[in-house]
Amino acid sequence: MNYTFQQITQKQAETIAYTWHYDGEYAFYDMEADEEDLAEFVDPEARGDLVYSVLDGNRLIGFFSFARTNDHTLDIGLGMSPDLTGKGAGLEFVQAGLEFAKESLNPQKITLAVAAFNKRAIKVYERAGFEITSTFSQATNGSTYEFVKMEYQDEKE
């Protein structure tokens, strides 16, 4: 695919928030599954300017969100269009997001958190160069879930 990153538009945010629905246990990642996350994602002010849509041509295929922490770490969140998940496109998508982040935002360290049940995503992140650093519990989607914290290990370092 040919990935283009651009600051997310309101229409794109609403498309992701209200029309992207994942199958089975991955419905956990539906934006509508957590009211607070949904409200933040569709509110331009709350969303901020570090959320990017990912396009392949004119087709919206995903998004990356970036949050800077006080220790020069860039924490990323991401999502792919439901019709692309589980089909082998994840690694290339994650690698494109990492390259965009390194070139555009120049982080000293990159981290992410993923639900511990999501072995499919954890495998992709490990193949992209992330290593598990810790686990933690977090309240979301009406309950408390176990998450895995991962840190990117740049092969060039």
Image (cartoon, helix red, strand yellow):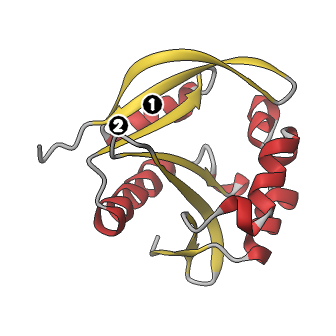
Q: What secondary structure is marked by label 2?
A: helix
Vertical placement of residue 90 versus 134, above or below:
below
Q: Residue at x 35, y 63 (%)?
A: 105
**What residue does disc 2 label?**
127
Q: Residue at x 84, y 39 (%)?
A: 34
Q: Are marks 1 and 2 in contact (CB under 8 Å)?
A: yes
- Residue 31 placement (x, y as % from top left): 80, 48
Q: Is residue 94 left or right of residue 130?
A: right
The total of numbered circles placed on residues is 2
- Residue 123, numbered label: 1
Q: Which is nearer the eye, 156 or 85?
A: 156
Q: Residue at x 44, y 17 (%)?
A: 134
Pointer 1 local density, CA inside 10 Å: few below 14, some 14–19, many at least 20: few
Q: Is residue 73 left or right of residue 47?
A: left
Q: What secondary structure is marked by label 1?
A: helix
Q: Is residue 28 left or right of residue 146?
A: right
Alpha-carbon span between mark 1 and mark 2: 6 Å
Farthest-out residue, front: 70
Vertical placement of residue 14 versus 124, above or below:
below
- Residue 76, numbered label: none
Vertical placement of residue 42 versus 34, above or below:
below
Q: Is residue 90 left or right of residue 34?
A: left
